[in-house]
């Protein structure tokens, strides 16, 4: 019999078959755990904010409450039941009346219930648009905070790189200072050993001393200048080291401040998502490029068509029109239909004789049946000033709503124009800052080489290094401003 390979023996074994479900479950758990631990995207954070933010839940619950009012508005008013019991029996020809029960149902004028239901539905739609507006504002807050966190992260990175450049410049200044100090020591040695080198005879000693004096003395007019220049050069290099150390202390303070700002902004971001404040926010290495924009007029048309605030005002205006219809219908009478039931005690079939007030009366027999009486009622809306005032109030509210819609349209148009201006400015600055950063890096490399060969100044190096940091920060700030402007456009358009 041919032996099976080892892998086939293992897979054919009963233990392996029993372990397959366990291995599959572990694999699924590991995949789920890895997906949870993986870097979350901005869309994931937006979904968490939509599900967890307490303020947003408040507006959604208000919308659900408004939906329930639609079911209340389309119903008839509750029927009225009236019941009376006589404490002392009331004798009538029909018998002794003991109780009276009536039921009445009022009906509004034709079409009133439908208008009330439509008005409640419009108010619910307006409440939903208010919820959408709050959701879009929350999304913009999440995006803006996310981009600001990215900006702080990039500032920390570029500031740390600037610190490394400063440390390199400090090492370079220390090197120059050490070289200057050693060269100064070497130049002083011959003057100190010149007299002992020519000590042979007396005359020779005098000549040698004269020669030594002449040789050691600098030329006229240049001795004091050269010595002071050497001393000034050495002290100047030490001041370069001190300047570098001062700049390093400042940049350390800036790094500490940026770290504090990042912690505070991370707390704000986590609170927007209503999760643990200490959770780390996953940030991308680079922000995605914003999508292509529509034309300016197309953007304005889209904003005016989709913005939740405009839609909410539109539904409010329609609800005010329905309220005007309701005011007219409330000026019509309401009709009630009911039934009255009167309960009588039965009498003797042959009649009865009784004394009433000293007189003897005969009460005929065979009566005492209960009474059922249909009823109809109608309200009389005679107070016409009340209904006229209600109609006027509804019309004024509708006119005010129309003016508010026009004002909101103008405000949104202006906001679109301002946002597009910010986007255009960011697009222009993008190429400028990249070119400036590239040129400053080349300039800094050349100036470092010049300073190493004693041809440049340390002040110029510090200035260029600071400019390089500033343009790096401007470049990332401009990128974040670009993304934030697009996020504001998305908030204004507020598509579903």
Image (spheres, rainbow, N blue to C red):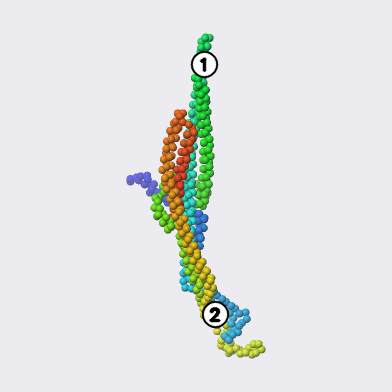
Residue 318 visible to the viewer: yes
Q: Earlier in the sequence, mark 1 or mark 2?
A: 1
Residue 352 % position (x, y) = 60, 89
Give the camera-side residue of 390 and 172.
Answer: 390
Give the camera-side residue of 56 and 204.
Answer: 204
Residue 299: quarter of image: bottom left
Secondary structure under tag 1 reads helix
Secondary structure under tag 2 reads strand
Residue 31 visible to the viewer: no
The residue drawn where x is 56% and y is 81% is 343
Residue 207 % position (x, y) = 51, 12
Identify the residue under disc 2.
Answer: 341
The residue drawn where x is 44% and y is 37% is 440
Residue 31 % position (x, y) = 43, 49
| Circle 1 Cα neighbour tier, 10 Å, few/some/many (<14 / 14–19 / ≥20) | some
What is the spatial separation of the Cα atoms under label 1 and label 2, in whole angstroms?
147 Å
In the depicted structure, whether residue 463 falls above or below residue 217: below
Give the camera-side residue of 159 and 103.
Answer: 159
The residue drawn where x is 43% and y is 56% is 303
Q: Quadrant of the C terminus?
A: bottom left
Residue 347: quarter of image: bottom right
In the depicted structure, whether residue 274 falls above or below residue 440: below
């Amino acid at each position: 019999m041919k032996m099976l390979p080892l892998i086939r023996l293992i897979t054919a074994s009963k233990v392996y078959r029993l372990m397959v479900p366990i291995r599959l479950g572990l694999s699924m758990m590991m995949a789920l755990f890895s997906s949870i631990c993986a870097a979350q995207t901005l869309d994931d954070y937006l979904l968490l904010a939509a599900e967890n933010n307490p303020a947003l839940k408040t507006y959604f619950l208000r919308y659900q409450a408004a939906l329930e009012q639609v079911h209340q508005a389309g119903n008839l008013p509750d029927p009225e039941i009236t019941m009376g019991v006589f404490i002392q029996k009331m004798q009538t020809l029909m018998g002794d009346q003991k109780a009276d029960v009536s039921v009445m149902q009022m009906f509004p004028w034709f079409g009133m219930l439908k208008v009330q239901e439509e008005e409640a539905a419009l108010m619910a739609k307006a409440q939903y648009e208010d919820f959408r507006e709050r959701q879009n504002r929350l999304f913009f807050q999440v995006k803006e905070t996310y981009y600001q966190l990215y900006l702080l992260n990039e500032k920390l990175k570029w500031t740390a790189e600037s610190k490394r450049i400063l440390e390199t410049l400090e090492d370079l200044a220390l090197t120059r200072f050490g070289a200057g100090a050693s060269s100064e020591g070497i130049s002083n040695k011959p003057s100190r050993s010149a007299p002992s080198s020519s000590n042979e005879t007396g005359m020779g000693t005098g000549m040698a001393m004269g020669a030594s004096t002449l040789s050691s003395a600098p030329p006229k007019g240049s001795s004091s200048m050269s010595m002071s220049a050497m001393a000034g050069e050495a002290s100047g290099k030490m001041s370069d080291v001190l300047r570098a150390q001062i700049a390093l202390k400042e940049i350390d303070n800036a790094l500490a401040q940026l770290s504090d700002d990042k912690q505070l902004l991370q707390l704000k971001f986590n609170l927007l998502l209503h999760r643990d404040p200490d959770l780390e926010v996953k940030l991308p290495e680079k922000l995605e490029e914003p999508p292509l924009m529509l034309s300016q007029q197309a953007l304005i048309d889209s904003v005016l068509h989709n913005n939740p605030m405009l839609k909410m005002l539109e539904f409010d205006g329609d609800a005010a029109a329905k309220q005007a219809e309701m005011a007219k219908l409330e000026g019509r009478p309401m009709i009630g239909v009911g039934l009255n039931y009167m309960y009588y005690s039965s009498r003797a079939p042959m009649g009865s004789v009784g004394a009433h007030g000293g007189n003897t009366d005969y009460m005929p027999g065979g009566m005492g049946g209960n009474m059922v009486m249909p009823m109809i009622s109608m309200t009389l809306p005679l107070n016409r000033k009340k209904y006229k005032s209600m109609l006027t109030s509804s019309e004024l509210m509708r006119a005010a709503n129309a003016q508010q819609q026009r004002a909101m349209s103008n405000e949104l148009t202006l906001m679109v124009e301002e946002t597009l201006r910010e986007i255009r400015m960011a697009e222009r600055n993008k190429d400028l800052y990249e070119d400036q950063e590239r040129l400053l890096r080349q300039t800094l490399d050349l100036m470092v080489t010049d300073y190493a060969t004693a041809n440049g100044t340390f002040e110029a190096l510090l200035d260029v290094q600071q400019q390089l940091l500033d343009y790096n920060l401007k470049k990332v700030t401009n990128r974040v401003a670009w993304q934030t402007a697009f996020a504001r456009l998305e908030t204004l358009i507020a598509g579903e």
